[in-house]
Amino acid sequence: MKFGIIKERKSPPDRRVVFSPDELARLKQLHQGVSVKVESSDIRVFTDAQYKNMGIEVTNDISDCDVFFGVKEVPVDNLIPNKTYFFFSHTIKKQPHNRKLLQALLEKNIEFYDHETIVDAHNRRLIGFGKYAGIVGAYNSIRAFGIKFELFKLPKAETLSGKGDMIAHLKRLVLPPLKFVVTGTGKVGNGVKEVLDAIKIKEVSVENYLTKNYTQQLGVRCGCKPNNEPRVERNRSTCR
């Protein structure tokens, strides 16, 4: 069987990829009968050279592959009939803007697996937003606040080298009175908390938040613990 890693073609461009060079090399070691090709891309987070250095074939034509892996929606014109595809189609919630994509998958006799619908034996999603969605979401929320109120400017997250770089930029800010509210304690919520902890968000109980006055600069984070006990965190705001 031949697997192909497709180039992301959705606009704006997405630099993500399903398999890193290391993971593809590992896949080939574990399954000797598997053939893997990577479609050449100038926007992917891993360069073509990084795949080639791991012994992975990089080419402009992967049409002979049986199964294709991508991240975002594949443009209708780029779908190859009678193949198998894995990607996020954004159709499971009946999104009207991707109706034509779903119709094209049917018309082209494509066997399709949506990342969003892949679950384990307990019906829990295996692919979805995780810790890094929370990390980037927290950064982007603060960035958007600064832009909206013309208080400060942060660089776009995709231009930074990683979490450490984002946190370094956040630590340079002098924030006005703010309340940060985070609902939930799952993977995304934990990612948000990781950022808030890094910029010294102080955690207080909901009871204290509701009944005490705070004169120091604080921010807020609230959610539900696994035992259903709510909690609130605050940093850099004067709140009552």
Image (tube, rainbow, N blue to C red):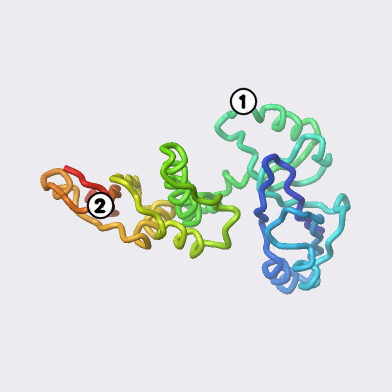
**Amino acid type at mark 1:** Pro
Q: Which mark is residue 142?
A: none
Is 35 located above or below residue 175 in the figure?
A: below
Figure check: 108 above or below 138: above
The answer to whether 41 appears left or right of 18 in the picture is: right
Q: Nearer the viewer, residue 121 or 7?
A: 7
Residue under numbered circle 1: 96
Quadrant placement of the C terminus: top left
The structure residue drawn at horizontal position 81% and vertical position 52%, both measured from the top left corner, is 66
Along the line of sight, which residue is nearer the eye, 102 or 184?
A: 184
Which residue is pictured at 70% across the width and 50% down the height?
Answer: 70
Residue 79 screen position, x and y as percent? 80, 40
Mark 1 secondary-structure assignment: helix
Q: Amino acid at mark 2?
A: Leu
The circle on residue 218 is 2
Disc 2 is placed on an element classified as strand
> In the rendered view of the protein, which quadrant contains the N terminus?
bottom right
Residue drawn where x is 57% and y is 44% of the image = 117
For residue 56, above or below residue 201: below
